[in-house]
Image: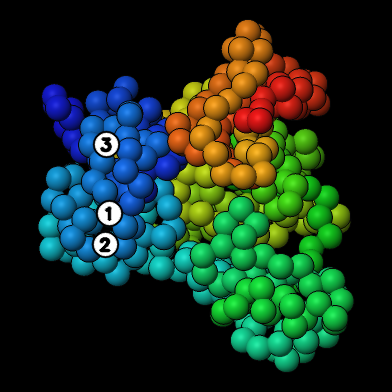
Amino acid sequence: MTLTSPGPTVGVVGGGQLGRMLGEAAAPLGLELLVTDPTPDCPAAPVVRDQLVGDFDEEETLRELAERADYLTFEIELADPDVLERVAEETGTPVHPDPETLRTIQDKLVQKRRLADAGVPVPAFRAVDTAEDLREACEDLGYPAMLKARTGGYDGRGNVPVETPEDVEDAVDAIAGPAMVEEMVDFERELAVMGCRGADERDTFPVTETIHREEILRESVAPARASKAVRERARDVAHDVLDVMDGRGVFGIELFETSDGEILLNEIAPRPHNSGHWTIEGCHTSQFEQHLRAVTGKPLGSTDQRFPTVSTNILGDVAERQPAELEGEDDVLATPRAHLHWYGKREVYELRKMGHVTLTGADADDLLADARTLRDGLTFE
């Protein structure tokens, strides 16, 4: 990559909040961003050079994106790896991470099998096609267990707990498609590591503690409130995961710290991830800048943490879909070391991710309490 004006162009499949924050990180690097998204005037549109309106797997749109870009990447797993691979070959525009990585990640069963084969520690799992399959698996794994759709799930969607044998039929009906079941992990806490694959180097951001409710990420605490040994083990597992991935970029690696101090892999996102949003203020290089550095083949930036940081998601708190009008933001803006990030979504509905608040300081417990107070003062009602 050579810096020019206008600069090298990165085409991004997806123009949601991740595309928006990639656009914000691109400008200081001298990069131009193009995004494609089916929603006109998507959240990323105000901060990127242009938006192509089209579905994530629409070949004509992705080919135009590739023709106008020097590099391709994606911020959503709904991109079609076959189409990406084809347009990259036809236009000579490289795609990172590699479409093969996306192909592996999109199917949770394929993902788990490949990682288990590579020696990455994962919860016990089984493929499930029928209710009888699920009963047999749960007899082996035990109740409760977690049934997961193999494709398409996010933010808790596509995950159904199976507490007792009486839940089996309803769980299979709720997934309504190919599935896998995992043992229910007795975990001390959930962790995440943002891993980075560059041209000739690899790195990880500090281990983060992630706090979920209803299987939706609510807060991230960095560094994680875990022992040094646990954090080192989490980092080692993250490096093992990076060995399995193909192509350059940032990878969100979600983990469990078990009650006996072991680390198990939960899932991987081959892109920047909600659990890494805190890096914008908390690290010398944000996950978004790092992803762009990696995709364009530039040296990776420092992942060193600047100070303890907590990030809390702003979620929709309304019963019905309605125009997004946030109230209470002045209290966030008036708070020292608090940072408001607004995603620019036009409509809000229950539990939709609309933004986040980051707070930096010294003590993680105090930061978390203060961040929750700020978050709870925000409403769309």
Q: From the top left corner, tell me how far across and down residue 337 is, in percent.
A: 62, 13
Q: From the top left corner, tell me how far across and down residue 15 is, in percent.
A: 37, 43
Instruction: Name the image colouring.
Output: rainbow
Q: Quadrant of the N terminus?
A: top left
> Mark 2 touching mark 1, by CB under 8 A?
yes
Q: Quadrant of the C terminus?
A: top right
Q: Specify the label residue 58 is tagged with.
A: 2
Q: Which residue is mark 1?
A: 54
Compared with 283, 157 (above or below) is below
Q: Amino acid at mark 3?
A: Leu
Of the image marks 2 and 3, the number of the one nearer the N terminus = 3
Q: Specify the label residue 33 is tagged with.
A: 3
Query: Which of the two marks, 2 or 3, is nearer to us in this view?
Result: 2
Q: Quadrant of residue 22?
A: top left
Q: Amino acid at mark 1?
A: Gly
Q: Is residue 200 left or right of residue 255?
A: left
Q: Amino acid at mark 2?
A: Glu
Q: From the top left corner, tell me how far across and down residue 110 is, in percent.
A: 52, 74
Alpha carbons under labels 2 and 3: distance apart: 19 Å
Res 202 seen here: no
| Mark 1 closeness class: few <14, some 14–19, many ≥20 residues within 10 Å | some
